[in-house]
Amino acid sequence: MGRIAGRFARVEPRRRVGDLVRGLLSDLPRKNCWSIAEWAGEATPDGMQHLLGRARWDADQVRDDVREYVLEHLRDEDAVLVVDETGDVKKGIHTVGVQRQYTGTAGRIENAQVAVYLVYAGSRGHAAVDRELYIPRSWTSDPDRCRAAGLDEDTVFATKPELAARMIVRFLDAGHRVGWVTGDEVYGGNPKLRSALEERRAGYVLAVACSAEVPTTAGKFRADALAAKVPRRAWQKLSAGAGTKGHRFYDWAVIDLAEARPGSHRLLIRRNRTTGELAYYRCWSPTPAHLATLVRVAGSRWRVEETFQAGKGLAGLDEHQVRRYTSWSRWVTLAMLAHAFLAVVRADEHARHPTPDGLIPLTCNEIQRLFTTLVVQPVHDAAHRLAWSAWRRRHQARAQTSHYHRQTANQT
C-alpha cells in the first residue's frame, strides 16, 4: 500500500483505500462497498462510496503502480503478454458499458459488461497489469447516456483488438520489453493488431479460426485446408505447459507462410491427442523461432483464465456494484492490486523457502486464507453488527418508499 500512498493527497482516503484492499482480500462471501465498510468497522458505506466515486485520485496512475509492482517482482526474460476479455453479468441498462452481448463467463448472450485485460505471464507468476472497458456502439452513439455514466461525451467506439493494442503500446511505451504476445481468435483475426505488433517488433502467437485464409507460395488457403496436407512425420508431441493434472501434451505442426512483410510468418497447428480437434495460430517473430518456443507462447494463453479465476474468486474483481466509469476503473484497479499482491507473495515464497516434503507449494488461494486469518481478520462487537443491521433496514425502507412513490407518479 505504500507504493500507491502518494496518489492520495489526504490521509483519510489513504487509510480507507488500505481498508478497501484488505477487504478485497478478506473472506467475505460478497464484496462490495456495504460489506467491506461493515467489515472494516465503519458506521456506513458512505466513505467507501466516496472513495470510489468522488474522491480526488487517478486510477490510471495506480494502474501504472500496479504494473511496476508486478514487473519488479515477476520480471522474466521469457515472459508473455496475454490479452483477453471477461464479462460480468449485470441487471438493468444504466451500468456503464452494459448491453446484451456474448460473454464467456455465462457461455451465452446476456446483459453484461465486458472488459479487456492485459496479463503479464512469466515463470515466477502472472497478474493483470492493465484494463480497458469495452464500450459498445449502443453507448458511444448516445452522448447523453455516456455523460450520465461518467464517460466523456466524445467517447469513440473501439473494438476489443483496438483496446488490446492500446494497452500493449502503453506497456511498451513505459519502457518495458516483452518478446511475445498471445490471445484468442478475437485478436488473432484482426490484421491491424498483428501489423501494430510487427511494427513494434513484438512477436505474437495469436489464435485464428479454421476458416482464416493464409498466404503460401502456392496461393491463399484456409487454415484447415493446409492442416489436412501436413504429413504424419511433421507432427511433434510437445507440452503446452504444466496444468493442475500434469503436462498438457498435444501434437504440433508448423507451416511457413509467404508474406511480403519482413519477419518470420508461420501457421502453428495444434492437434488434441485424444479427440483430434485442431486449433490454429498466426505467428510472427523478427527472426525464425523454434517450434518449442511457439508452443510455449501458445500455452501461456491459459494463464489469463487462471488470472481471471483468482482475481474474481480471491480479490472481488467481478463483484463491484457500481454504475459509473470512474467507480468501475477504481474498483477493478484496486482488485488488480490485491491479486498482484497474492501473486508476488507466492513468487517470493517459492523462491525463498523450499517446499517441505509431502506438501505442494503455496498457492494464491492458501496465501489468501493465511493472510486473512493471521493478519487482517477484524473483530467487531455486537453493537457494531446491530447498528449495521439497523442501517441496512433503514436504507432499504427509504428505497422501498421511493420506488412506491415513483410507481404511483407514473400511473397518474
Image: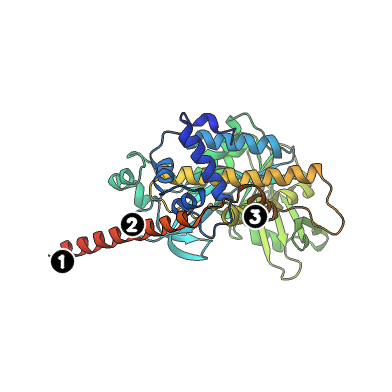
Dot 3 corresponds to which residue? 306
Residue placed farthest to the left in the image?
412
Q: CA distance from mark 1 to mark 2?
A: 25 Å
Kind of residue sitting beneath label 1 = Gln
Task: Identify the mark nearer the N-term, 1 or 3.
Answer: 3
Q: CA distance from mark 2 to mark 3?
A: 38 Å
Residue 284 visible? The answer is: yes
Residue at screen point 40% across, 55% down: 98
Q: Secondary structure at mark 3?
A: helix
Kind of residue sitting beneath label 2 = His
Residue at screen point 45% across, 55% down: 383
Dot in front, 1 or 2: 2
Task: Identify the mark nearer the N-term, 1 or 2.
Answer: 2
Q: Quadrant of the N terminus?
A: top right
Above or below: residue 130 compared with residue 32: above
Position of 129 with respect to 294 (left or right) is left
Dot 2 corresponds to which residue? 395
Residue placed farthest to the bottom in the image?
275
Asked whether disc 2 touches disc 3, contact meaning CB atoms under 8 Å apart, the reply is no
- Pick whichever, 18 or 223, lies toward us: 18
Position of 266 with respect to 39 (left or right) is right
Above or below: residue 355 compared with residue 288: below
Dot in front, 1 or 3: 1
Q: Secondary structure at mark 2?
A: helix
Q: CA distance from mark 1 to mark 3?
A: 50 Å
- Pick whichever, 145 or 389, lies toward us: 389
